Amino acid sequence: MHSAHTGENSDRISTLEAFADTIVPGEKRSAGDRAIAGAADGPGAVAAGAVELLGTPATGLSDALDDYVRSLNEHATAHAARRGLRLDPGLPPFTALSYEDRTAVVAALVAPGHPEHELWVLLTLFCNMAFDTGAHLHTTDALAAGHPGLTALGFAKPDADGLWRFPRFSYRRPLARPHPDTAPSGSPA
């Protein structure tokens, strides 16, 4: 699965980055970047911290990532064999696939009826979550660092004290009257 020039950890990272980039594509970090296919302008899931999020124990996936990587590379190898593709032996098989072939592999894995469907959908959801919410970061820190997903979504920055206050109602009207025992802070009394 890996050459003598790369270690298992770099193969693991490369495979997970290639998967995350397939879910929320972004631009290459450099001309020689193989994990990120460059299928979209701007930063994608990798720049948003998908690999970091996947590695946090809170996801419940961190102990299974080696199994995900092994399985994903097995699926990539089988896909390449079915299509008569030659893979770069210096790269993990999934990373060596083109973006279109990566997408085909992932589409098959998340398709209803695939026996591993739920496992791959779960991995996919966390890649999306890294981009959409920066779930592995404190929101104020993510916004201060220019988190690509939160920035792309136009997530409002907090006030100077790090708290969010919304002086105007998002629906341009109150949806309900505050309970009479609500404290000035907005907390229930």
Image (cartoon, rainbow, N blue to C red):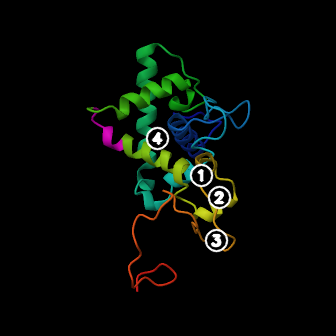
Find out whether the residues at labels 1 and 2 contact each other: C-beta distance under 8 Å.
Answer: yes
**Alpha carbons under labels 4 and 3: distance apart:** 38 Å
**Mark closest to the chain's N terminus, 4 or 3:** 4
Q: Nearer the viewer, residue 168 or 54?
A: 168
Q: Residue furthest front?
A: 173
**Alpha carbons under labels 1 and 2: distance apart:** 7 Å
Query: Is 179 left or right of 15, judged from the image as shown?
Result: left
Q: Which mark is residue 162?
A: 3
Residue ID for mark 2: 143
**Alpha carbons under labels 4 and 1: distance apart:** 27 Å
Please provide the residue range marked out in magenta: 114-119
**Mark closest to the chain's N terminus, 1 or 2:** 2
**Alpha carbons under labels 4 and 2: distance apart:** 30 Å
Element type where label 1 sits in the image: helix
**Mark closest to the chain's N terminus, 4 or 2:** 4
**Mark closest to the chain's N terminus, 3 or 2:** 2
Q: Which mark is residue 150?
A: 1
Element type where label 3 sits in the image: loop
Closer mark to the observer between disc 4 and disc 2 = 2
Residue 67 image-quadrant placement: top left
Can you give x and y, in whole percent of width and height, for residue 78 in the image? 41, 24
Whether the magenta-drawn stretch holds residue 122 is answered as: no
Can you give x and y, in whole percent of width and height, for residue 29 in the image? 70, 38
Query: Quick one: label 1, few (<14), some, or many (20+) residues within 10 Å?
Result: many
Closer mark to the observer between disc 4 and disc 3 = 3
The type of residue carrying mark 4 is: Val
